[in-house]
């Protein structure tokens, strides 16, 4: 999984019907530095669109997963989903 | 998923028969900057060939998925597909 | 999927028996520039070994897929294959 | 698989219920140089969140796997997991 | 698949029991240049840990696969494996 921050959302009226009912959120990956502070990862590597499985909102720090894991985690596992928020972060500790 | 722009298409007469009937589109990944404007991702990282599942055309902004999710989303899930357009974007908002 | 050019081949006499009968080709990813001309992607990102499912030869421009999609596309889906050529390209158009 | 060092942990009270009971650890990939010494891989490429399947603790050198392999390895294979520690390293030898 | 050179090994006494009996080898990806000579890919991109399915040893040039393909190729497909050597290379030809 990766740590990310929800930075926005996408609206798509015309879409695969199996996506109906999912919030499509834009997420930016965050990486902890040596002190545990989270640094934003810019550009294509750090940015993707995910569905929300846990009630996350814009600005929140979350855990998200990718690939077939995201698909298998959402609904019946057959929606065209390859990214999903699966947790809302309380604290990050780096030692 | 990723945000992308359809920039072209590929014609391949000789191909795996399970690909017959699919439009093969060239997609370029787009990443929102801090204002929500979409910036093109050049080169190998940002460019791939996908099938279209929602009636997208050249120049449109779309959502696409990758890997086994794309394969599972298209037809009976057995075609040699690892990228698929699954939504046409109305708006992108970044906060 | 990705666009690639077949640039060579690998011979491996000792191999997993499920690979017997497959041609092992070296492929270099190609990315269209703004005019539709295909530019070679050098190095690790752009180079891999794939099996050929459509009768492609050295020098040809092809479409190839990766990961579980390549495996599922070849034979009974159980061979140790994570890259496969699935189409031979006639034309690439970028708008 | 990859070699990694456990550098921290994440607490997420609100999460997909299938993650309950798993320790969420932050891992940094390590790469051996020519002498076998392990060098840390900084940034997004080298950092992820994984579950622990073998009792690893902060500071330990481990082997971790990714993607559907991590998911299939944990419990009944249906939890939203795409990274998992599967071994604790005794020695690394590079020749 | 990728071309790689076996450069070392990892010993892990405490590990997922489904890994018992597998040799854990460190592999470095190799990429052919224009003449067919193989160049080493340093760093995180080029380095991983794989199991050996074909009797490869340190110093040998091999073909390895990744992800769910490696898992599906090893034993009953349920071990926590995401990289596997599936062939030992005799020759590489680049045209």
Image (cartoon, coloured by chain):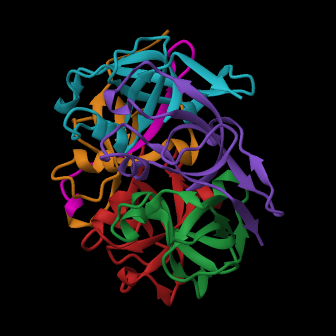
Chain colours: A cyan, B orange, C red, D purple, E green
Q: Which residue is drawn at 68% across and 59% down?
A: D90
Along the line of sight, the residue nearer the viewer: E92 or B60 = E92
Residue C33 in view: no
Residue E24: percent from left, percent from top: 58, 67
In the rendered image of this protein, does residue E28 appear above or below residue D18? Answer: below
Numbered-mark total: 0
In the rendered image of this protein, does residue C64 appear above or below residue B4? Answer: below
In the rendered image of this protein, does residue D76 appear above or below residue D92? Answer: above
Q: From the viewer's perspective, is C77 left or right of B38?
A: left
Residue B54: percent from left, percent from top: 22, 35
Residue B34: percent from left, percent from top: 57, 15
Q: Which residue is drawn at 71% across and 29% down?
A: A95
Q: Residue at x 23, y 37 (%)?
A: A79
Residue C67 in view: yes
- Examine the image and state in which quarter residue A65 appears: top left
Q: Give the range drawn in magenta.
A: B18-38
- Examine the image and state in which quarter residue C91 appears: bottom left
Residue E54: percent from left, percent from top: 50, 81
Q: Residue furthest right?
A: D35
Q: Which residue lies furthest to the bottom in this view?
A: C13
Along the line of sight, the residue nearer the viewer: E43 or D91 = D91
In the rendered image of this protein, does residue B50 appear above or below residue D89? Answer: above
- Examine the image and state in which quarter residue A82 appears: top left
In the picture, which quadrant includes the C terminus of chain E?
bottom right
Magenta span includes C67 = no
Q: From the viewer's perspective, is B55 left or right of D84?
A: left
Magenta span includes B19 = yes
Along the line of sight, the residue nearer the viewer: B25 or A29 = A29
Q: From the viewer's perspective, is D35 left or right of D86?
A: right
């Amino acid at each position: 999984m990766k740590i990310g921050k929800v930075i926005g959302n996408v609206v798509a009226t015309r879409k695969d019907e199996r996506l109906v009912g999912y919030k499509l959120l834009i997420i930016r990956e965050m990486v902890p530095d040596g002190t545990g502070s989270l640094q934003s990862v810019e550009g294509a590597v750090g940015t993707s669109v995910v569905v929300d499985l846990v009630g996350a909102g814009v600005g929140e720090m979350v855990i998200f997963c990718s690939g077939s894991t995201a698909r298998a985690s959402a609904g019946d596992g057959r929606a065209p989903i390859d990214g999903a928020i699966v947790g809302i972060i309380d604290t990050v500790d780096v030692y």
